[in-house]
Image (cartoon, rainbow, N blue to C red):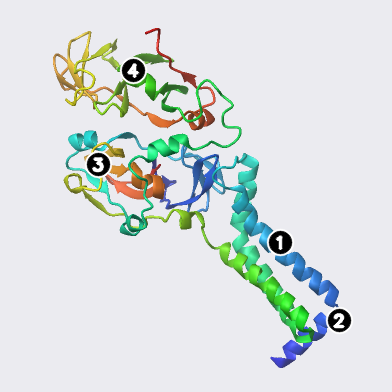
Amino acid sequence: MWESTVDGRVLHFHLAGINNQNFIMRDEETGTWWQQVSGKAINGPLKGRQLKPVFHDEISFAIWKREAIQGRVLKPDEKIVTKNEYAPADWEAHVGKMRVVDGSDVDQRLTPRTLVAGITVAGKSKAYPLSALQKQSPIIDVIGSTAIILVLGDDHRSVRAFERTMDGRRLEFLQKTEQGTSAPLQLVDVETNSTWDFAGRAIAGPLAGSELKKVFVLEDYWFDWRNYHPGTSIYSLGPQ
Amino acid sequence: MSNVFARLSDFVNARRKVVWLTVLVLVVAVLVIVLTPVFLIMPFKAQTPRVLAVSYQMRRWSPLLTLAAAAVVLFLAIGLWVGGRWFSRIALAILLIPTLAATWLARQNHFEWMFNPLPSPAYVKAADASFVNDDDRVLAVKIGSESVAYPVRIMAYHHLVGDTVGGTPIVATY
């Protein structure tokens, strides 16, 4: 998700093609081609420019609604609904089985369609297989010199990440709610015993009112993540 | 006007072979410049930066070049038609059809035929969004005090939607 303004001018984008299964957008104003996943101009007058990222989450509707009941939701286009061309509810399983283009399985540490939560902090990238998070959440980690935490939501599918340094102190977290319950997820930090919610806010305890800094998570297939983050490392669970 | 046609016909008939060759070369060129990017940029094919750069240039220049080429082809075809026999007239008609089709295609965005854009997106309040299931995934953004959810099942079709959230113009992409 990107800001549309470049040099004070608002650009209007169209779907214009595909580059190794990641789409290209073209802006009406200059005709420049932009890569969707990176926000980078790859051809045309603005080549080399970078769109400014807009922080966002990919979460389940139930979790979003709980947090943003005053919000608005994009409505489907009736014409497309009638033609039945929107993705079905189980489309993720279909896409997961689709083939990838030749040459995109060069890095065989994971299979190409493995779903990963990708994180980049201070130029260092790391991929967390969704299956690892589904086995162990939260994941406490350090990327470069940044201490982070990845959390799986109570829908067992949505992933969020935060920096876990608060007032110069690194916090360690444990899950407070039991896995598999439908109660809103809560975490507790070992250092102050404060309670935190899935939005990264301390809701009880000494740190109540504090908020962890959000870290952008790109949920992607391994082959695509690897393509745009060639130096990425992969998180693996320790011996169980 | 008839004087113009007579002179065109004289000009063409003095060098019919060269004119035929020119028409053929132009028709092939028009087809190449329009169809090459269509074949290079296909969903399950690998693309290199070079392939994308070539496709970009072809897409960029094809509206202008196809129009110019089609005009010349049409002009010469009239000359060939006037002094031509029935079989060359049929050949001319067969050559004109793909030329005009390609000139039209150079002005189209066939990706938006496959995935129709959403130029005036509509929104509903969170509580009224009965078209989204609780476990459907959404792209969620909050800027200032404004929160918006873009259901992934809708985004996986349109791929991009322009919006202004909290006063900031954005493009939501998936």
In this rendering, the answer to whether A236 lies above or below B146 is: above
Q: Amino acid at mark 1?
A: Ala
User: Which residue does the image show at 26% across and 14% down from the upper left?
Assistant: A167
According to the picture, the residue beneath numbered tag 4 turns out to be A135
* SS category of the residue bearing label 4: helix
Calculate the distance from the C-alpha at mark 4 to the C-alpha at mark 1: 58 Å
According to the picture, the residue beneath numbered tag 3 turns out to be B133
| x, y percent for residue A154 | 24, 26
- In the image, taking residue A211 as reference, residue B152 lies left or right, namely right
- In the image, taking residue B131 as reference, residue B90 lies left or right, namely right
Q: Quadrant of residue A91?
A: top left
Between label 4 and label 1, give the one nearer the viewer.
4
* SS category of the residue bearing label 1: helix
Calculate the distance from the C-alpha at mark 3 to the C-alpha at mark 1: 51 Å
Q: Which is more N-terminal, label 1 or label 3?
A: 1
- In the image, taking residue B86 as reference, residue A142 lies left or right, namely left
Q: Which is more N-terminal, label 2 or label 1?
A: 2
